[in-house]
């Protein structure tokens, strides 16, 4: 499973759990319905700003979008995170560490 699919899958799962249509949710994050559909169908990865808006609506932190539902295997997530961290520049690793400390 790719990073993008984890993010978009998390967004869709939370939207559906909240019983919101794509149209309703797009309105809550000030996005066009087509733009939101493109994200949910993995055509585009949401920007950091959009992820922040989504997290604000759900009252969660961005990392929670990566959490699987009960049926998914955590090893998929660990593998993706490991790959991302291995290729991440030091300055970003420091920022990631600071964000984790805030959690």
Image: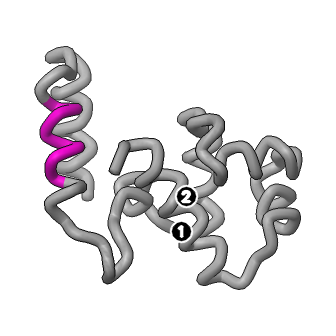
Residue at left 79%, top 42%? 35
Residue at left 79%, top 64%? 22
- Mark 2 — residue? 55
Secondary structure under badge 1?
loop
x and y, in percent, of residue 29 in the image:
76, 53
Q: How is the image coloured?
A: one colour
- Mark 1 — residue? 59
Secondary structure under badge 2?
helix
Q: Which residues are magenta?
A: 78-85
Residue at left 30%, top 72%? 72
Is residue 85 depicted above or below 87 in this figure?
below
- Residue 1 located left or right of residue 16: left
Examine the image and state in which quarter residue 47 appears.
top right
- Residue 31 magenta-highlighted: no
Residue at left 47%, top 65%? 60
Task: Answer few, some or many: residues within 10 Å of disc 2's Cα (few below 14, many 20 plus, some between 14 and 19).
Answer: some
């Amino acid at each position: 499973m790719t990073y993008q699919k984890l993010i978009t899958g998390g967004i869709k799962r939370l939207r559906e759990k909240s019983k919101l249509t794509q149209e309703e949710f797009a309105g809550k994050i000030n996005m066009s319905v087509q733009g939101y559909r493109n994200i949910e169908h993995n055509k585009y990865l949401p920007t950091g700003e959009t992820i922040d808006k989504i997290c604000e609506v759900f009252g969660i932190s961005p990392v929670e979008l990566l959490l699987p539902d009960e049926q998914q295997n955590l090893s998929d997530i660990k593998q993706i995170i490991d790959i991302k961290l291995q290729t991440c520049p030091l300055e970003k690793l420091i920022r990631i560490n600071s964000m984790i400390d805030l959690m």
